[in-house]
Each structure stands twice: as C-alpha cells, then as structure tokens.
Amino acid sequence: MFSTRSVEGRVVLVTGGSAGIGRSIAARLAASGATVVTCARDEVRLRAAARDLPGTVEPVACDLTDRRQRRDLVEGVVRRHGRLDALVNNAGQGRVGLFAELDAEGVEEVVALNVTAVADLTRLALPHLAERRGDVVVVASVAGWVPIPPLTLYSATKAAVDGLVHSLRREVPAGLRVHTVNPGPVRTEWLLRAAGLRPDDEEGRRGRTFGTRPERVAAEVHRCLTARRHRTVTVPRWLGAARLAGVPPLSNALDLVLRSIAPPVARWAHRYQDELVRRARDE
C-alpha cells in the first residue's frame, strides 16, 4: 500500500518550475497543502507562474549549473522555513542531433544541468532530508533505459541519474526514500529549449511536443511523496516494459536496428524541431 502519507504542511523544493513538468508538479503539491519552493533561471516567468498557482509557492531565481547558487538555494530554504522535507529534481535539458554533431559547449551544458546539478543538489539536501525522514524524487526518462538517437547525450545523462538513484537507496538512512519517475514523451516546450530558445508562455504553448500531459507526471511525483517505500515508475505505466530493452538479446537487436536508422531519424527530429520553432514564433 503506497499512498498512506500526506504532503500537507511539508516543505518541498522543486527545480525547473517555470513551465512544463516542474510547473505542474508545483501546482499539484501546493494544491495538496505543501509549501513549495520552486526555482528556475527565468525569474520573470517563474514569478508569473508562481502567482498563477494555488496554495503556497515561493519562486527563487537560480542557475543550477552554478555551485554557489545550488548551495545558497538549499541553505535559503532551510533558513526561511526551518526545514526541508523533500527535493524534486526536475530541471533538465537536451540537444537534438547525432552525438558526433554536438559541440563541446552543448555537451558541457547538458551534463552540467542533467547530472552534476542533480547530484550536487541532492548531496546538499540529504542531511536535511534525513532529519525529516524525507524524500528525493528524480524526474529521469525512459530514454535512460532505451537510448535512442538523436537523443544519445540526453539518454546518457538520464541513465546516469537513474544509477545515482539506485546507488543512493543502498546508502541513505532508513526512512529516507529515493524515487525515480521516468516519463516517455511529454507535451512540453522541451524541444524549443533544446534549440536554444527561452520561450514565454504563449510561445511555449504553441511549440509543445507530442506526448502525455505533464499533469500525469506530476501525479506520479505526488504518489512518490506519499509512499512509504522507494518507487521507480514510468509515465504512462505501460512504458515500464522498456526496461527489458536493456537485456540481451533484445538489446543486441536494438543496437542493430537503431544504428541503421539513426541518420534518417536524426533528420526527421531536426525537421520536427524546426517546425515547432516556427510554430512558436508564429504570431
């Protein structure tokens, strides 16, 4: 039986809260009675999002790739609220393209946000969470189990944080839970940001990708925070079968198939991304 706890009255830090999944998570938890501290780099959009959400949502501008800002973020939450009960690592980014086509700056930016920031923010939060018998939730991806060109780098970073989650479960104190939520495609502005855009709400709405609604991911995060044990879940649930893709001989077969179609898939992805960018910029 999982859902026997409550988020009411708890202090939860949610990263990447200005749009998409993070914004939906903040809304879901605040509506359920949590005090939500949410962060993002775009302070204007973050504050506007917080004003529109129900309950108590505190926006904090933060570049998670800056180690000092990560430290100040956690210390500020504890100083203002006296505690930290849960951390939801949601912020992330990607690049579209075959790995050899990426530039060094893009590689460093994706790894810095998707891996280094998640690991270090979790490290900073763990002492406070242990005191509260709290929770860490990492929003990873099914792509971490089934790496698919042209999202090779993104897939690798999600595999890295999935490994971090499973390792942490073997060392954290009893009563502290570490969860991973693994969505498939989600209807967000993810590809616009992967193209280097910083869209406003209207541009983001016009440039959403196909996929499940971010509210469904938020619902699974909420279930993690009300569970008594570690959870590893997918959104939608049937995508859990994707874990079998890492087991031979299926993994070997996928290597052969995906290698043969990687270039045309990359070209299609670039065209789709370009179309979303045009759609977002269309007045």
Image: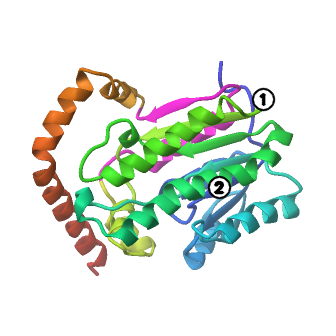
Q: Is residue 171 above or below residue 160?
A: above
Q: Residue at x 40, y 34 (%)?
A: 236
Badge 1 element: loop
Q: Is residue 139 above or below residue 266?
A: above
User: Residue 224 occupies which quadrant of the picture?
Assistant: top right
| Mark 1 Cα-neighbour bin, 10 Å: few <14, some 14–19, many ≥20 | some
Which residue bears the numbered disc 1? 175
- What is the distance, in whole Å, between disc 2 and disc 1 at their CAs? 21 Å
In the image, residue 110 lies at what x, y percent?
Answer: 44, 61
Which residue bears the numbered disc 2? 120
Residue kind at label 2, given as amino acid type: Asp
Q: Residue at x 20, y 67 (%)?
A: 275
| Mark 2 Cα-neighbour bin, 10 Å: few <14, some 14–19, many ≥20 | some
Residue nearest the observer in this picture, 243 or 239: 243
Q: Which portion, as a residue range, is magenta?
A: 210-236
Q: Residue at x 32, y 23 (%)?
A: 247
Q: Quarter of the image containing the N terminus? A: top right
